Image: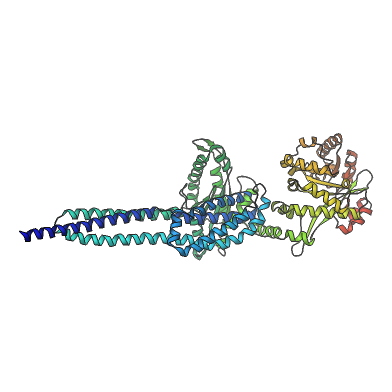
Amino acid sequence: MVRSRKYYYLACIFHFVLAVIVAGALVLIETKKRELSELTYRDVAWSATNGRFEFSEMERNLVLFNLTDEVHYLEQGLLYREILRGRIRIWQRGDFAEMLRRRPDLLPDARLVRDAFEALDAQLDQIDQNEPRTAYRPIATALPIFDGMRPSVNALTSQTFTTSIQEVGALRDQIEGHEGILRWALIALVLVGGTQLVFVYQQNSSLAKAEQQARANLEQVSHLANHDALTGLPNRMYFETLIREIAGDRHRRRRGAAVFVIDLDRFKSVNDTLGHAAGDALLREVVRRVRPVLNEAAADHVFSRLGGDEFVALVPQIGGLDAATDLAVRIRNAIAEPFDLPDGRVTIDASVGVAMIPPDAPETVWLDADLALSEAKQNGRGGVHAFDPALRERAIRRNRIERELPEAVRKGQIQPHYQTQVSLEDGRLAHVEALARWRHPELGWITPGEFIPVAESSGQIGALGLHILEQACRDAHLALPGTVGVAVNLSVAQLRFASLPAEVAGILARTGLAPHRLTLEITESLLIKNFDSTAAVLDAVKALGVRIALDDFGAGFTAMNYLARDCFDQIKLDRSLIQGIASSPRKQTVVAGVVALSRRLGLEIVAEGIETPEDAMLLKTMGCDLGQGFLYSKAVPPEALDGAAAAPRTSAFARSA
């Protein structure tokens, strides 16, 4: 009995120990299962992947703004800057910070990203979004910082994803090890009962479900890393990978494929008026409408969303640029049809840039399509433009002009040339107009129509305009009689600077030119868009005693309301109204009406573009005060001013000039 009781107690102890082992194994497995489930749901890899995407988008938009001067690229770049700032803050706490503590080898990259972004942020803080011209120098300074950040951003993304996979694998291995212990314990428990077998079956089923869930979660993370959450389309990262694959596959490059970059026009107004929910619904409807058009062209196309209101499509074996352009038109037309949204009917346009993948340099196709898109948008909403090499050449030339413009001003390569304005009454020299000319040592003569817009868009027009103004005032003071004035074109962009009146006063003081001898000319078509914001500066300049002229009057949509303001002394009739006026009764009627109105307002009238004595005589009889054109003189360099002042104002002089 004692022995039986002893065996009984031993059996009880044995059963108790086995039960404790089984219970401990169960608790351990459940703990590891929870850890595995939590790990698979962590968003560390997802956060790092999004950070890399936001970094790439920020860099791309800022580079494109430098290349194209499109303001929306600047806005997108600064928007992604704000998103990336928040992302870096997220990386400094929570699961991401815990991962960095487990992986101290990644801390240098994390610190480099944080410090480089702070330096980048400091540069971009200098940008005033209301003044895009202020962006170029900070962006140019910031671009090398992107190059320094990129390896660390890529390292954080890849290593974070690898760490997540390794930790899931380690937990799975631990669970499998504990499962083995449990199996051995259950074999022993089979001798004392079958209930443990059911228990083991339940645990194995739970473990299988946990592993299946882990695999599903990993697949979901991979899908989210390569697809847009709103539309379900492949994202920019996926498309970049595809382009790299094509670049490395010579056979696929020969098959001929086209890339289409699609930008929705007026999409922002939908967000602003109907809300972001309506904007999201519109994006999904755009995808639903464009997909059938692409399917008709090629079933194996790739349609991706880049972000915001931009999409990109790759269509293989399209058959040439003409067929690609035709497809781009069909895409544009499909989007232009009205959309019936829950909040109402919406109509938008789309601009499309298309480029064929070049066999010799496939990696440039994205930039080629972007350049084509910029050209399409410059021509108005709803445009379609196909890439041609001239676009890239113009972009390269424009960048070179922008880059070398400050040095050209410093070295005196940009100088004013002068065209005379003569009295139609007696032929005396009344004024000379200063016209900027750039003689580039390698590119030759660069026209003002090419470098002035670059100076305006890059924020360099202020320095360039003041340089020309001061040189013209100095030349007029030194080389022209006191009765002859000088006219200088003033960019409307310069009128946005409140310091302009003081700068003009300083130039007059330094050069010694009397204020009444200076006439500042403002182009009418540009002034119409900015008159209210520039009127105060214009009045302050006029208060110095400087004359103000309204240039190119009648060249565009003429607005008469601002003529009622007492800020203009002179109107310059555009050459489009003057050339051929002797044979055009309609032009004569228009000019006669403008002259009569100007007389009533007390404004001096200059007729530009006079080329024949007949036109000059007719304009004289109509009451125009001054004439300017090749009949009298071409634009001459400063050293020829003495001769221009002394020469008679005849057609013979015009031919000799």
For residue 79, above or below residue 445: above
Q: Quadrant of the N terminus?
A: bottom left
The residue at the point 72 percent across, 51 percent down is 456
Q: Nearer the viewer, residue 74 or 243?
A: 74
Q: Quadrant of residue 528?
A: top right
For residue 469, above or below residue 571: below
The residue at the point 80 percent across, 42 percent down is 540
Query: What percent of the width, then of the height, locates residue 115?
Result: 56, 59
Visible residue check, residue 45: no
Q: Nearer the viewer, residue 432 or 508?
A: 508
Q: Nearer the viewer, residue 65 or 11?
A: 11
Q: What color scheme is it?
A: rainbow
Q: Residue furthest front?
A: 2
Count the marks: 0
Query: What percent of the width, then of the height, locates residue 199?
Result: 21, 53
Visible residue check, residue 354: yes
Q: Quadrant of residue 159?
A: bottom left
Q: Nearer the viewer, residue 529 or 198?
A: 198
31 left or right, relative to 651: left
Q: Quadrant of residue 123?
A: bottom right
403 left or right, relative to 606: left
292 left or right, relative to 129: left
Query: What percent of the width, then of the height, locates residue 616?
Result: 89, 45
Q: Residue furthest left?
A: 1
The residue at the point 51 percent across, 63 percent down is 108
Query: What percent of the width, then of the height, locates residue 496?
Result: 73, 46
For residue 13, above or below residue 537: below
Q: Quadrant of the C terminus?
A: bottom right
